[in-house]
Image (tube, grey):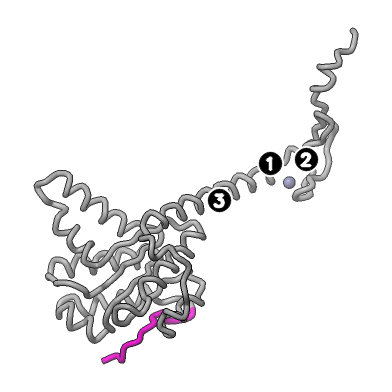
Amino acid sequence: MDSDPIADRFRLDRVGIEPCPGCGDPVQAISAFGRVWHECPRCAEQEKQQRRQREKIDRALAQWAVVTPPTYREKIDRSRIHPTIALAMDLDFSSGIGLVGPSGIGKTRVAFFALRMASARGLLPGRVTAAEYREAVSLRHSGAKETASRAEELIRMAKWSRALLIDDIGKGANTPAGDEAFYNLLEHRRAEKLLTFWTSNGGSGWLRKKLGADYGPAIVKRLVDLATGPDGYRIFSTQEET
Ligand SMILES: [Zn+2]
């Protein structure tokens, strides 16, 4: 049979077993188009996992941009952050962080920074204020269908986000039902080992008083749990504790 120059050009030749250039495993080598490919299951699997991880990170960072107001997307000017709060920026963000102090010292800015660092590791981020969560809990059984389903969605997001920022704890009015729901959220995230960053305008003494005798102490305890890493407490406070 005459040789067909086109078929020759596109012919795949198994050139035999060779060590994989990636991992060294003995694998089938294939020659085609003047190149040699190695059919390596181990390297193919590794590439697939790396691709998945990159996609996860892209999704998480895109979500971070969705949940983060424009002003908090800007690069942080460390000189405008209270020095105690700024210390939190030097951590690795693999454990939760608590930021305590009055308004205007950069707590929320640093918390969004922490959330971004978690997103860059592929953890899908969420953000909620403590007051929004309480409100959602009170609206979840609302007669208005759309209101109820929006509330339900916020609750699910707060419960299951791989990394969650809970902003402004202790701000606004408290009700026993709201305190209970908030405690349950914290307890759920602790039990599921979900990464949680939080900010509060006051320290533990202030929070205990603000949240009432029934749930105050328990909520403070959970907040401490959520902001504890292998290196100890990760609570950065400008307040004198009482
Ligand atoms: Zn290989």
- Residue 141 place in picture, x, y as percent: 13, 51
Q: Report the amino acid beneath label 1.
A: Pro
- Pick whichever of labels 1 and 2 is earlier in the sequence: 2
Query: Observer-nearest residue: 119 or 228?
Result: 119
Q: Is residue 194 left or right of residue 142?
A: right
| Mark 2 C-beta closer than 8 Å to ligand 1 | yes
Q: Is residue 88 left or right of residue 36?
A: left
Respond yes or no on whether mark 3 lies under 8 Å from ligand 1: no
Q: CA distance from mark 2 to mark 3?
A: 27 Å
Residue 193 shows in the view: no
Alpha-carbon span between mark 1 and mark 3 = 20 Å
Task: Verify whether residue 186 appears in magenta.
Answer: no
Residue in the picture at 51% in, 72% down: 92
Q: Are marks 1 and 2 in contact (CB under 8 Å)?
A: yes
Q: Position of residue 131 (x, y in %)?
A: 21, 66
| The furthest residue to the left | 143
Q: Amino acid at mark 2?
A: Val
**In the rendered image, which residue does mark 1 sit on?**
41
The residue at label 1 has a CB less than 8 Å from ligand 1? yes
Q: Which residue is mark 2?
A: 27
At mark 3, the secondary structure is helix
Give the residue at mark 3.
Answer: 54
Q: Which mark is residue 201?
A: none
The stretch drawn in magenta includes residue 241: yes
The residue range painted magenta reads 231-242
| Residue at x 78% of width, y 37% of height | 37
In the rendered image, which quarter contains the C terminus? bottom left
Relative image position of residue 115 (x, y in whole percent): 42, 65
Q: Residue 134: name its quadrant.
A: bottom left
